Image (cartoon, rainbow, N blue to C red):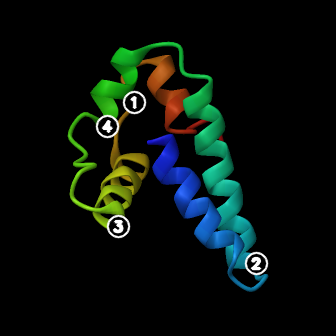
Amino acid sequence: MQELLRSVQANQKVLPDSPEKAANLRWIARRLAALEQADNAADLIALFGGVRFHGGARNAFRGMHYVYVAATPHSEGQRRLLCRDE
């Protein structure tokens, strides 16, 4: 997951500067930080266990993004992983 987000981050960095690029980089950075601070693998599995990471980067990112947007956190750890403290 982190590798995929870092790849998306690298792709964003080569784009021309824009407010959208800056917002995307902030979004990615927050999720990377949350993943690095995760202390419970069960929360990761509960949230992202259904994402198919072997179907290509684009499809994997779509699946992850859907989880970030639509998942309902059922624990404090899941809430932190989804960056729902905004």
Residue type marked 1: Pro
What percent of the width, then of the height, locates residue 71?
A: 34, 42
Picture coordinates of residue 25 (x, y %)?
A: 69, 61
Q: Residue at x 54, y 59 (%)?
A: 7
Q: Nearer the viewer, mark 2 or mark 3?
A: 3
**Residue 48 disc label:** 4
Amino acid type of disc 3? Arg
Q: Amino acid at mark 2?
A: Pro
Q: As drawn, is 13 to the left or to the right of 72?
A: right
| Secondary structure category for the residue under label 4 | helix
Q: Quadrant of the C terminus?
A: top right
Question: In terms of sequence position, does the residue under pointer 1 or pointer 4 come before the other?
Answer: 4
Q: Image point 74% across, 86% down: which residue?
A: 16
Mark 4: which amino acid?
Answer: Phe
Q: Which residue is mark 3?
A: 58
Compared with 31, 37 (above or below) is above
Q: Earlier in the sequence, mark 1 or mark 3?
A: 3
Q: Which residue is mark 1?
A: 73
Q: Position of residue 54 (x, y in %)?
A: 23, 51
Q: CA distance from mark 4 to mark 2?
A: 29 Å
The residue beneath circle 2 is: 19
